[in-house]
Image: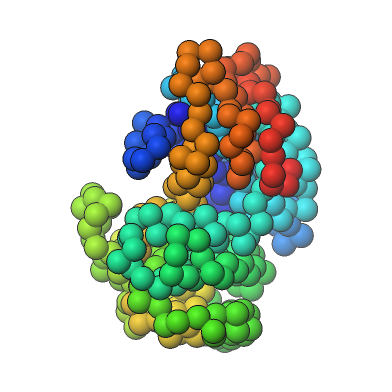
């Protein structure tokens, strides 16, 4: 089966296409990434600006066309908290569906935590033992832990870097020490309450950070460059990160974007991301964590692969592009090919197997 996963997050829409074969790892085919910049285009009332909605529509249109061009059998489209929690979410969903036929659906934060944990387990393997995972997104922080493929505990709290930047930090730089201190105290209090659900678990052998936020903070504090490849060991040290928090607070977004590892798209929320990461590591007793190159998209892939291994698809020319009815879908499914959308090629038609919310 050739599977496409379309993940629309706070900063970008990312289509990842891979071939799934029972017994093997997902074999990457191609990927497509387009900026949508929702975090900076969402006001304090949670309303996404119309120009940002247009960027989402354009990215979804291009992704649909790319999926069709690469012969994708099944497309799994979802949006994370940036759209899930938006005040005008119905407008965004309707405009994307009208243009492309893609009906965006949404996981709970706990489901995102579960699938990201599954990806980290797939990357680090069983030798990681009891594992504690942190994943900082634009709208939420996911926490999961466990000693198996599935986490024993999966939690989500509204501590995303974009959300905290909008609601807890001033728009101008430098950011005052008291503002940073207040944000850190708020984050610590929320994580402290959340950590109660982790107290009965064994001590983790491996601490993992997934997401672009952790990858960029690790690079900022001295981890290898991206060109070193995904297998280069990358760690985030809490003390080094803590030393960078006041330096980020003293800089404007433009100045942060010139630092190693900090992209222009995420520079404005890099301070909040650093505060969340440092506070979470402190409260949870983590001195160093390993950065995982796999995250939510790969977790969706692995979840689909496990379903495929349990209920193999019929291997015939007539049914190769069908979604097996026996497969317990864990994501919205769309079949290809189809016609053209209002914004160009790549209109899709939904198959009614949607266990998530729309």
Q: Position of residue 166 (x, y in %)?
A: 64, 65
Q: Nearer the viewer, residue 252 or 293?
A: 293
Q: Residue at coordinates 60% horizontally, 84% vertically from top-left?
A: 196
Q: Quadrant of the C terminus?
A: top right
Side of 254 where 289 appears, left or right: left
Q: Identify the image's colour scheme: rainbow, by chain, secondary structure or one colour.
A: rainbow
Whether residue 186 can be seen here: no
Q: Is residue 326 left or right of residue 149?
A: right
Residue 24 placement (x, y as % from top left): 34, 40
Depth check: give the residue in front, 283 or 181.
283
Left or right, 9 with reference to 98: left
> Relative to the observer, which residue lies in front, 218 or 168?
218
Residue 340 coordinates in the image, percent (x, y): 63, 15
Identified at 69% across, 44% down, the residue is: 355
Asked if residue 94 can be seen in this view, the reply is yes
Q: Residue at x 64, y 38 (%)?
A: 332
Q: Answer with the quarter of the image where residue 168 lies.
A: bottom right
Dividing the picture into quadrants, the one containing residue 323 is top right
Give the quarter of the figure containing the N terminus.
top left
Q: Residue at x 60, y 69 (%)?
A: 155
From what the image shows, is residue 79 above or below residue 224? Answer: above
Q: Position of residue 313 (x, y in %)?
A: 50, 28
How many discs appear?
Answer: 0
């Amino acid at each position: 089966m050739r599977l496409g996963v379309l993940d629309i997050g706070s900063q970008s829409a990312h289509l990842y296409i891979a071939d799934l074969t029972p017994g093997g790892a997902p074999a990457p085919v191609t990927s497509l990434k387009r900026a949508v910049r929702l975090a900076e285009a969402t006001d304090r009332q949670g309303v996404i600006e119309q120009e940002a909605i247009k960027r989402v529509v354009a990215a979804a249109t291009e992704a649909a066309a790319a999926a069709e061009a690469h012969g994708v059998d099944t497309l799994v489209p979802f949006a994370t908290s940036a759209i899930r929690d938006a005040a005008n979410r119905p407008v965004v969903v309707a405009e994307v569906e009208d243009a492309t036929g893609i009906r965006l659906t949404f996981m709970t934060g706990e489901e995102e935590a579960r699938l990201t944990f599954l990806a980290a387990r797939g990357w680090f393997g069983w030798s990681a033992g009891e594992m504690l995972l942190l994943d900082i997104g634009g709208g939420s922080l996911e926490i999961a832990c466990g000693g198996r493929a599935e986490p024993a505990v999966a939690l989500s709290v509204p501590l995303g870097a974009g959300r905290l930047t909008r609601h807890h930090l001033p728009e101008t730089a430098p950011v005052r020490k008291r503002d940073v201190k207040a944000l850190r105290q708020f984050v610590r209090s929320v994580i402290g309450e959340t950590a109660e659900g982790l107290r009965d678990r064994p001590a983790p052998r491996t601490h993992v950070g997934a997401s672009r936020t952790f990858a960029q903070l690790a690079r900022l504090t001295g981890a290898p460059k991206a060109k070193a490849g995904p297998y280069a060991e990358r760690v985030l040290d809490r003390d080094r990160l803590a030393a960078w928090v006041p330096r980020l607070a003293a800089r404007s977004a433009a100045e942060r974007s010139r630092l190693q590892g900090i992209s222009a798209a995420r520079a404005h929320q890099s301070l909040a991301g650093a505060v969340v990461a440092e506070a979470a590591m402190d409260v949870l007793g983590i001195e160093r964590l390993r950065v995982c190159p796999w995250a939510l998209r790969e977790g969706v892939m692995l979840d689909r692969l496990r379903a495929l291994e349990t209920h193999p698809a019929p291997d015939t020319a007539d049914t190769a592009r069908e979604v097996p009815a026996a497969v317990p879908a864990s994501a919205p499914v769309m079949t290809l090919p189809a016609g053209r959308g209002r914004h160009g090629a790549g209109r899709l038609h939904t198959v009614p197997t949607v266990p998530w919310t729309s």
